[in-house]
Image (cartoon, rainbow, N blue to C red):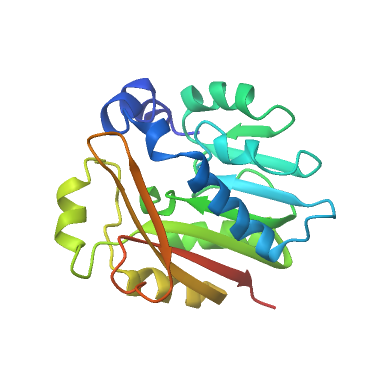
């Protein structure tokens, strides 16, 4: 893995860009992600899932422990904690644009990760290689268009966000490489008092500050 990437996402990165990381990832948010996965994968059968940009492994800790849970992140600092949070899961330090193995996953997820990846087309090739035939790819990304676009840009202090794109960009990218099944919007914000807003909507998805997309590997 690139040494620069490994050091870019160390303790200083999280303490500066995401000092309220735990508050920004409350249980109800992670349970929403879990429901996205369970919507497409049978709960009562063994499954294999890869989480790209798994960070501290919180999402994987909510999944069925009988599943094969794989987490990948460039941050070795975060992965050390992930081993504690999600016992039984497997983790690897790797650049998401250069997938190190073929894991034959039923689903690959990327929650707030794609905006960090420089070469998205190369990443799509790796994701498709990771997936079984007709496997699912689920991702969440911030979007910078609509009436809240300027506000999102102002509040975004993460200098590693390479792609500050509108929702149309992400939907076109997804449709180019996968079969898009559905997408919805997410209004989210951590208020100064520590309360985290996380509202999912289909009706107002054109105005939300983030989108969640469920796609499937093409035949």
Asked if one can make out residue 102 in the rendered structure from this viewpoint, the answer is no
Quarter of the view holding residue 148: bottom left
* Above or below 101: residue 141: below
Quarter of the view holding residue 63: top right
The residue that appears at 83% across and 51% down in the rendered structure is 46
x, y percent for residue 215:
57, 70
x, y percent for residue 55:
49, 35
* Above or below 179: residue 49: above
x, y percent for residue 81:
55, 22
The residue that appears at 29% across and 51% down in the rendered structure is 162
Please tell me which residue lies in front, 84 or 202.
202
The residue that appears at 28% across and 68% down in the rendered structure is 166
The residue that appears at 68% across and 45% down in the rendered structure is 101
Which part of the image, by quadrant, shows the C terminus?
bottom right
x, y percent for residue 76:
50, 25
Compared across the picture, whether 207 is left or right of 11 comes to left
Please tell me which residue lies in front, 69 or 97.
69
* Above or below 135: residue 218: below
Compared across the picture, whether 117 is left or right of 62 comes to left
């Amino acid at each position: 893995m690139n040494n620069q990437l490994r050091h870019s996402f160390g303790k200083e990165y999280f303490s500066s860009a995401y000092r309220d990381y735990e508050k920004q990832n409350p249980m109800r948010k992670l349970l929403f992600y879990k429901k996205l996965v369970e919507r497409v994968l049978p709960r009562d059968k063994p499954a294999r899932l890869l989480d790209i940009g798994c960070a501290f492994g919180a999402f994987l800790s909510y999944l069925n422990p009988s599943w094969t849970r794989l987490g990948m992140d460039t941050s070795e600092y975060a992965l050390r904690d992930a081993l504690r949070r999600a016992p039984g899961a497997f983790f690897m330090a790797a650049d998401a644009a250069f997938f190190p193995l073929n894991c034959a996953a039923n689903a690959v997820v990327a929650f707030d990760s794609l905006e960090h990846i420089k070469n998205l087309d190369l990443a799509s090739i790796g994701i498709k290689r990771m997936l079984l035939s007709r496997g699912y790819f689920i991702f969440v990304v911030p979007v910078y268009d609509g009436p809240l676009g300027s506000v999102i840009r102002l509040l975004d202090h993460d200098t590693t966000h390479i792609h500050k794109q509108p929702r149309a960009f992400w939907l076109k990218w997804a449709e180019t490489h996968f079969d898009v099944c559905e997408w919805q919007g997410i209004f989210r914000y951590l208020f100064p008092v520590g309360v985290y807003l996380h509202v999912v909507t289909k009706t107002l998805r054109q105005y939300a500050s983030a989108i969640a997309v469920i796609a499937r590997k093409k035949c």
